[in-house]
Amino acid sequence: MVREQTLSLETDGTQQTAALAGQRFRVRDHYEVGREKIREFARAVQNHHGAHQHESEALRLGHENVIAPPTFASVIGSAGTRSLLESVLTEYDLSQILQTDQVFQAYRPILAGDRLSSEILIESIRQFGGNDFVVVRSALLNQHGELALIGSTTIVARRGVAVDPNVAEVVDNIMMHGQVVEFPSAESGSDDSSPLIPLGAGALPQPAPDRVPAPVHTLPDVERLATGDQLPPKTFRLTRGDLANYAGVSGDANPIHFSDHAAELVGLPTVVAHGMLTMGLASSYLTEWLGDPTAIEKFSVRFSGFVPVAANAASTVEFTGRIKSLDPHARTATLVLGGTSGERKLFGRALAEVRFS
């Protein structure tokens, strides 16, 4: 990878970055899914389903170990994306990056005890004005070589912007210091401590053609549902403590989520909730209605607004849902979700593809 970076520096930054589209990388270290980490994440996204807490409840759904919540993979994926930005897509200032879209396509539940390996693909880099729109896809494979999930993240990055000295000061004096240490794999026989291993151009792993999805155990009776049916609304409360907790559990320590000073520097009225926290809450809303978190096969969100959270008062987030389409024979549906906080609309688009028992 060092050689490739050296050669690419002979071109200008735009050509260097654009040429990376289509390149794949393997995250050098694996991720071991912990039972307590699952419990912590479920608490952080206010998901109270028993299968995230107790083996007996997970077994009732057909799984021997505690099940990770639907957006748990963001913990692993965001770490991989950070490594990509720090070691490959180095043209961008990390303070000038905004996530706009997130998609999770689940193939197998992530369970406590799983040992997950990650592959990352820079799917596309599109330039518009002074911004680059970068789509990064990642695949998680378990210890059996089975594809568990493919995630897709779209970020918008500003190119060639000088770092604001005030932002640099925030990094030094407010932001959490230290980072996850990447260790070389014993199997690789290499002393290279870089977090990513270049794999060249190619596609991400795909599910086995003979894959049979595990049964689900949902609460709604598909025979009683119809296109256009509304899900019951639900309201969540968010405090500064919730934001601090999610920052620690998820590893997203952007100071705009806990420091008024940092938020004001980037033009925000106050501290705001993580976009992925709002997506996590939305998945908790879905889980409560479905009764089985593994029934969510695909969940995609385009972020369009934020949740401001004052220092001395809780904010509220309300979710609604509607059945956009229904296939009673396949026992599947596509749901449209809405999320609002006050007058702010949080999602430009939020869709979930679900299965019924």
Image (spheres, rainbow, N blue to C red):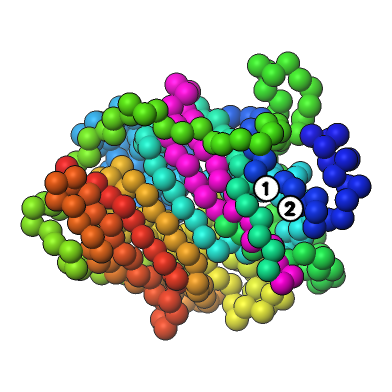
Looking at this rendering, what residue extends furthest in the right direction?
10
> Is label 2 in a helix, a strand or a loop?
helix
Residue at screen point 28% across, 57% down: 334
Residue at screen point 66% across, 55% down: 125
- Residue closer to the observer: 29 or 178: 29
Residue at screen point 28% across, 50% down: 354
> Is label 1 in a helix, a strand or a loop?
loop
Residue 215: mark? none
Residue placed under numbered mark 1 in the picture: 21
Callout 2 environment at 10 Å: few (<14), some (14 to 19), or many (20+)? some
Residue at screen point 60% across, 40% down: 120
Q: Position of residue 59 (x, y in %)?
A: 25, 31
- Is 26 on the left-hand or right-hand side of 241? right
Vertical placement of residue 311 versus 333, above or below? below
Q: Position of residue 23 (x, y in %)?
A: 67, 40
Task: Evaluate if marks 1 and 2 touch, with contact meaning CB atoms under 8 Å apart.
Answer: yes
- Residue 221 lies in magenta, yes or no? no
The quadrant of the image that shows the C terminus is top left
Looking at this rendering, what residue extends furthest in the left direction?
224
Q: Amino acid at mark 1?
A: Ala
First to last magenta residue range: 129-153
Locate residue 95: give its quadrant. Answer: bottom right
Q: Is residue 293 visible?
A: no
Q: Position of residue 258 (x, y in %)?
A: 60, 66
Q: Is residue 336 visible?
A: yes
- Residue 139 lies in magenta, yes or no? yes
Total labels drawn: 2
What secondary structure predominates along the stretch shown in magenta?
strand
Vertical placement of residue 195 versus 312, above or below? above
Label 1 to label 2, Cα distance in Å? 6 Å
